[in-house]
């Protein structure tokens, strides 16, 4: 499997290198779907300029990245393109290794449950075979590296790519059972964009005695940031910015239009309501998916990418890379073709409606927000469809494919 992975990596790096040297690079970096006020490369450059002048990068309202990111690029600014290509490759390799180990765990679990007669006798066709699972890690790496969303995020030098790498290594460390590394990478991901805090729940299902390691790692990283800057200014500038959503620049999220139209005295209440959305589903999902922490991670990453305050297509690319892992659920998906078409069409219409609104003046913000809303509804329905398919398959595994009522007639499974 090493040779196909190397080939995929070479193709992905070549595509990125060509785009970096093309006129499309400037166009992509300006797209609001790819860069947000939180992770735009222009803002990182602005922060570096202030740092070089001896001024705090957080003294204005431009820079909202973390201190570790600005100090990383303070030393690697000349190699920024290489850094982003390497982070994408590292993310793909980490996901590849994580899914390899996950497939081994799944196969052993299936074998044990079959030996213990936990599965119904007529569900042989639902059991995953080693042959079916063999190419899944490669497909995951392929889905990540050659996804147009990932490519655009890399070419725009959005720091979302770095956050994806940290989350990928967190998933790898968790599946391998390394509590210390898992806690460190989750602390880094939380430090970087706050919302990965919700991934603490699936990690806790995987690893015991996790809370203390995670909290200690997070405290150490935040203290390190303080010593680098000798100031706590980064906390309101980064985390206050994420939570209060003061910059209403249009993006593919749900916040900007709603709060642009909102009366000021209602905004605090609705900001709280919108932000709670990301965290609200964690406990119910933890209860329902307590025996399936990897699927829980997949759903939670998708929820973060949909409901966070400043989402970009790079966030979506991370959870979409996991879709091949659940290829055995395709037979139970109800609307996969329609939803795929919705997401593709919306992706194509984003720049069209933006042009009509901003440049042609023949449309307004309602048009752009309508396509944004459609895009997010499509994502929500897609994740709901996978969640339904997963639960349906688990039910069939224990109760059998051919369900009957007490009177012997065929029954239909309904998820309530």
Image (cartoon, helix red, strand yellow):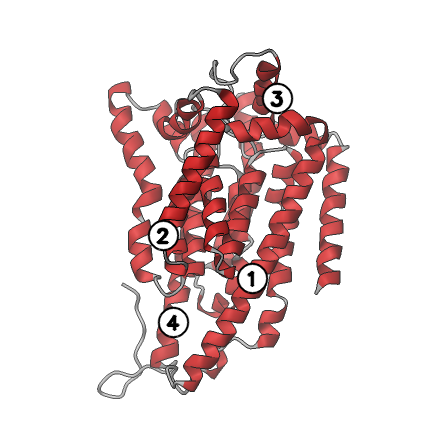
User: Residue 352's spot in the image, x, y percent?
Assistant: 57, 33
Residue occupied by mark 2: 201
Give the mark nearest the N terminus, 1 or 3: 3
Q: Number of callouts in the render?
A: 4
| Res. 364 mark | none
Residue occupied by mark 4: 394
How far apart are labels 2 and 1 at the CA level? 20 Å
Residue occupied by mark 1: 99
Q: Is residue 62 left or right of residue 274?
A: right
Q: Nearer the viewer, mark 4 or mark 2?
A: 2
Give the mark nearest the N terminus, 3 or 2: 3
Give the mark nearest the N terminus, 3 or 4: 3
* Circle 3/circle 4 CB separation < 8 Å: no
The residue at 63%/25% (across/down) is: 74
Residue occupied by mark 3: 45
Query: Within 10 Å of the Cα at label 1, are there few (<14), some (14-19), or many (20+) other Cα atoms?
Result: many
* Circle 1/circle 3 CB separation < 8 Å: no
Q: Is residue 42 left or right of residue 369?
A: right
How far apart are labels 4 and 2 at the CA level? 21 Å
Q: Nearer the viewer, mark 3 or mark 2?
A: 2
As rendered, which of 381 and 308 lies closer to the eye?
A: 308
Query: Within 10 Å of the Cα at label 3, are there few (<14), some (14-19), or many (20+) other Cα atoms?
Result: some
Give the mark nearest the N terminus, 1 or 4: 1
User: Residue 364's spot in the image, x, y percent?
Assistant: 46, 25
């Amino acid at each position: 499997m090493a040779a196909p992975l190397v080939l995929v990596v070479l193709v992905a790096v070549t595509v990125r290198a060509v785009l970096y040297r093309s006129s499309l690079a400037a166009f992509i970096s300006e797209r609001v779907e790819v860069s947000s006020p939180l992770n735009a490369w222009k803002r990182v450059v602005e922060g570096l300029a202030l740092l070089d002048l001896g001024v705090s990068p957080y003294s204005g309202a431009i820079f909202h990245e973390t201190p570790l990111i600005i100090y990383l690029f303070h030393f690697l600014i000349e190699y920024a393109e290489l850094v982003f290509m390497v982070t994408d490759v590292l993310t793909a390799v980490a996901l590849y290794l994580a899914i390899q180990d996950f497939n081994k765990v799944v196969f052993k679990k299936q074998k044990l449950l079959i030996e213990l007669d936990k599965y119904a006798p007529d569900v042989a066709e639902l059991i995953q075979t080693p042959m079916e699972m063999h190419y899944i890690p490669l497909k995951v790496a392929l889905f990540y590296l050659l996804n147009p969303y990932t490519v655009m995020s890399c070419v725009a030098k959005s720091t979302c790519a770095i956050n994806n790498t940290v989350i990928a290594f967190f998933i790898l460390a968790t599946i391998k059972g390394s509590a210390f590394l898992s806690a460190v990478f989750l602390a880094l991901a939380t430090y970087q964009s706050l919302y990965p805090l919700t991934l603490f729940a699936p990690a806790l299902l995987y690893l015991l005695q996790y809370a203390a390691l995670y909290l200690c790692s997070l405290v150490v990283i935040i203290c390190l940031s303080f010593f680098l800057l000798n100031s706590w200014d980064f906390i309101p500038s980064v985390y206050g910015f994420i939570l209060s959503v003061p910059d209403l620049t249009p993006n593919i999220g749900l916040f900007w239009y709603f709060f642009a139209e909102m009366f000021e005295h209602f905004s605090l209440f609705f900001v709280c309501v919108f932000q709670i959305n990301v965290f609200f589903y964690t406990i119910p999902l933890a209860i329902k998916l307590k025996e399936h922490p990897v699927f829980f991670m997949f759903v939670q990453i998708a929820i973060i990418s949909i409901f966070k305050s400043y989402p970009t297509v790079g966030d979506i690319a991370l959870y979409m890379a996991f879709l091949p892992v659940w290829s055995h659920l395709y037979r139970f998906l109800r609307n996969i073709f329609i939803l795929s078409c919705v997401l593709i069409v919306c992706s194509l219409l984003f720049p069209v409606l933006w042009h009509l609104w901003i440049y042609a003046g023949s449309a307004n913000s309602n048009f752009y927000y309508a396509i944004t809303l459609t895009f997010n509804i499509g994502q929500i329905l897609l994740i709901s469809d996978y969640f339904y398919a997963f639960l349906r398959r688990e039910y069939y595994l224990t109760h059998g494919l051919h369900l009957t009522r007490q009177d012997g007639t065929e029954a239909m499974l309904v998820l309530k």
